[in-house]
Image (cartoon, rainbow, N blue to C red):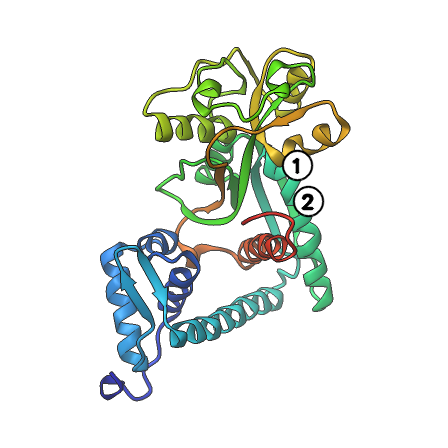
Amino acid sequence: MASQVTDGAMPDLGSLELLVAVVRTGSISAAARETGVTQQSASARLRAVERQLGLSLFHRAPSGTRPTLEGEVVASWADDVLAAVGRFRTATRTLRGESTARLTVAASQTVSARLLPLWLVALRRRQVEIGRTPTAVQLLSGNSTDAAALVRDGHADLAFIESTEVPVDLGATMVDQDELVLVVAPEHPWNARGPVEFDTVADEPLVARELGSGTRRAWEDEVRRRLGRDAAEPAVVLPTSAAVRSAVAGGLGAAVMSRREAADDIRLGRLRAVRTAGEPVIRPITALWRGGARDLSPAARELIEVAVATAKERVRSGRGTL
């Protein structure tokens, strides 16, 4: 491959973004969606990068795309280049008098209550440490469908959703994962049992969030995936996670909800987490924006980087899985 190197040829920024996305996601198709190109175009651009550099960057297999050792090294260098470009864009904004970056973020309830505050603290700390004015963030909270609509309509720059259904008309990248857990009141019969069969929970009318909620969508999608049928209709539908927790604690029924959302009530003994048979129910937490990766503002890109870094740090410290 070295004989094919074009002297002085360098990959463009879009190709570097694609390269980094493939290494992060392990999939050319996922990286293509994230960067706003077709899979065919993504494959062609990656091969062009390999020709330009004279290096084999990926092992391609039906199970996915894995970077070679050279691919991992080049991707880390590409990350540095893209970070430098982000700093350059921020600096030129400052020269134009746009010294205070502003970002409107729409987030579903679990993210806005449990994750976004941590991300914003980390973002502010990072910016202060390098002498930058912290980004001014406005938060809009709703369910996952609402958050996606706010980005689509131009009312938010960035959204974070918990749904298994990711809009195909928006840029997207997964930043974290979240476990759903079955919760009941301490006196509920399931609390005294061993693992409850998954189909038993699926047949139970639960206390649930409204249609459009990422939690409800993730649970119903998982039931269809495992059992090939719909879950039972909810016993009651409530508009907030807090209302669901209160209803379950009051004995109205069981619920499936984010372990993060239920953590405080479980710790205080108001709710009990009940194991279900089979693998845990895991849903993605996804960032959404209009356009492709190059359309992200520096502030939005930086917040996404902080979210991903926070999740990785949690995994490294043993406080949960990504």
Question: Does residue 31 appear to the left or right of 85 in the view shown?
Answer: left
Badge 1 crowding class, 10 Å Cα cut-off, few under 14, some 14 to 19, many 20 or more, is: some
The three-letter code of the residue at mark 1 reads: Ala
Q: Is residue 42 or residue 205 the one in the foreground?
A: 205
The three-letter code of the residue at mark 2 reads: Pro
Q: Look at the picture and state if 107 lies above or below 16.
A: above
Q: Residue at x 63, y 36 (%)?
A: 260
Question: Does residue 255 appear to the left or right of 78 in the view shown?
Answer: right
Q: Quadrant of residue 133?
A: bottom right
User: Which structural element holds mark 2?
Assistant: helix
Q: Which residue of the protein is positioned furthest toward the front in this rendering?
A: 194
Q: Residue at x 72, y 28 (%)?
A: 265
Q: Residue at x 69, y 65 (%)?
A: 132
Residue 287 at x, y = what percent?
Answer: 49, 46
Q: Is residue 158 or residue 33 the one in the foreground?
A: 33
Q: Quadrant of residue 312?
A: bottom right
Q: Look at the picture and state if 183 lies above or below 2.
A: above
Residue 8 at x, y = what percent?
Answer: 33, 87
Residue 298 at x, y = what percent?
Answer: 54, 59
Q: Look at the picture and state if 15 lies above or below 286.
A: below
- Number of numbered discs overlaid on the protein picture: 2
Residue picked out by circle 1? 113
Circles 1 and 2 in contact, beta carbons < 8 Å: yes
Q: Residue at x 51, y 29 (%)?
A: 215
Residue 63 at x, y = what percent?
Answer: 30, 55
Badge 2 crowding class, 10 Å Cα cut-off, few under 14, some 14 to 19, many 20 or more, is: few
User: Which structural element holds mark 1?
Assistant: helix
Q: Is residue 316 or residue 306 the one in the foreground?
A: 316
Residue picked out by circle 2? 117
Tell me, for residue 60, which label it has, or none. none
